Image (cartoon, rainbow, N blue to C red):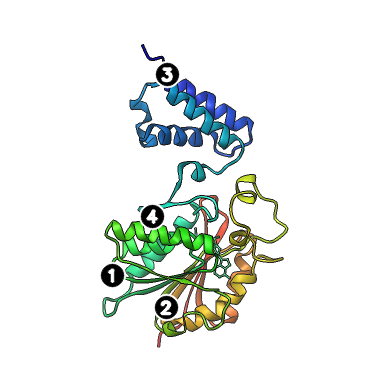
Amino acid sequence: MTERLRLRPLIVEAAARLAEAGVGSPLPDAENLAAHVLGTERMRLALIPMVELEVADRYRALIEQRAARIPLQHLTGTAAMGEIDLAVGPGVFVPRPETELLFAWALGYLGTLTHDHTPIVVDLCTGSGALALAIAHARPDAEVHAVELDPDALSWARRNAGTRIAEGDTPITLYADDVTDPALLTPLTGRVDLVVANPPYIPDAAILDPEVADHDPHRALFGGQDGLDIIRAMVPTIARLLRPGGATAIEHDDTNGGGVAALLAAAGFTGIVEHTDLADKPRFVVAGTDHP
Ligand SMILES: C[S@@+](CC[C@H](N)C(=O)[O-])C[C@H]1O[C@@H](n2cnc3c(N)ncnc32)[C@H](O)[C@@H]1O
């Protein structure tokens, strides 16, 4: 008879191993990896009291990889944004839960627009395509454009865009381009309703967890000495792209809310509001262009 083990003690043992290795969320990660190995959802683990020895072995091997501080999402191969899952792995930034708040704000903003035209949305620094594809999924009526410079990240974005098209979402337009180029997306000048951006914004000297420092691409992380280099270069372009009455939402380092707000104010934006994240830290700034 095949040997079987009780699942819950295995998970508890795994969580202890992850805690010992310094993983920040040991029990959720142990449960998520168990769900991944068993091909189920975390909330349904209680329905699986016993597992075969071979499954336990595979689970323990994954736990050892996580204990070596490989990101959870590289082990499961996916990360969520809004209602969609994105394929992620080496070469692309793993979308973070805090960006969900910017995404929710963006959907709320799009919901306030009148229906006299197709909403046009631009996602600068799209990475895996997270914000652009989640917006296209939630708002199939929108025309969504997304810009990314890094070839590896672009491959992941193309893969995710293809998956979303296969699932029936409205296609987005992906551009291999540099968001610091003052001529970016010239044909969209003055036509865009909403620009969202989660750019590289970490100050160069910041000390990061191994999951981030060793696995997220450095181009996705660092924004120069004060973390504002990319944002500083993007702001005039955002101002040019937006139509009168348009809006932008920019994620930033928790040390930089005031810095981003000041850049937007200097570029003539109005209605500048700072938003905090789930840990109550300053995380994204929204601003608008005046109505005609
Ligand atoms: C923090 S990641 C965010 C990715 C995605 N928006 C998300 O929320 O998951 C920043 C992304 O900006 C890209 N990037 C960095 N510099 C860029 C530039 N000058 N032009 C375009 N993309 C750039 C990086 O390659 C990376 O994919």
Indicate yes or no: mark 2 CB to ligand 1 under 8 Å.
no
Position in image of residue 60 (x %, y %): 52, 27
Q: Are marks 1 and 4 in contact (CB under 8 Å)?
A: no
- In the image, farthest residue toward the bottom: 292
Q: Amino acid at mark 3?
A: Arg
Secondary structure under tag 2 reads: strand
* Disc nearer the start of the sequence (2/4): 4
**Which of 260 and 275 lies nearest the eye of the viewer?**
260
Would you say residue 88 is visible in this rendering? yes
Label number found at residue 6: 3
Q: Report the Cα–Cα distance between label 3 and label 1.
A: 49 Å
Please, is residue 275 above or below residue 9 in the view? below
Q: Is residue 109 left or right of residue 221?
A: left
* Disc nearer the start of the sequence (4/3): 3
Position in image of residue 5 (x %, y %): 43, 17
* Disc nearer the start of the sequence (3/1): 3
* Disc nearer the start of the sequence (1/4): 4
Indicate yes or no: mark 3 CB to ligand 1 under 8 Å.
no
Q: What residue sits 27% from the left and 59% below the top?
A: 168
Secondary structure under tag 3 reads: strand
Q: What residue sits 45% from the left and 56% below the top?
A: 100
Residue pointed to by mark 1: 141
Q: Residues within 10 Å of mark 4 (few under 14, many from 20)?
A: some
Residue pointed to by mark 2: 246
Q: Report the Cα–Cα distance between label 1 and label 4.
A: 17 Å
Front of the two marks 4 and 3: 3
Q: Is residue 282 left or right of residue 147?
A: right
Residue pointed to by mark 4: 82
Q: Amino acid at mark 1?
A: Asp
Q: Amino acid at mark 4?
A: Gly
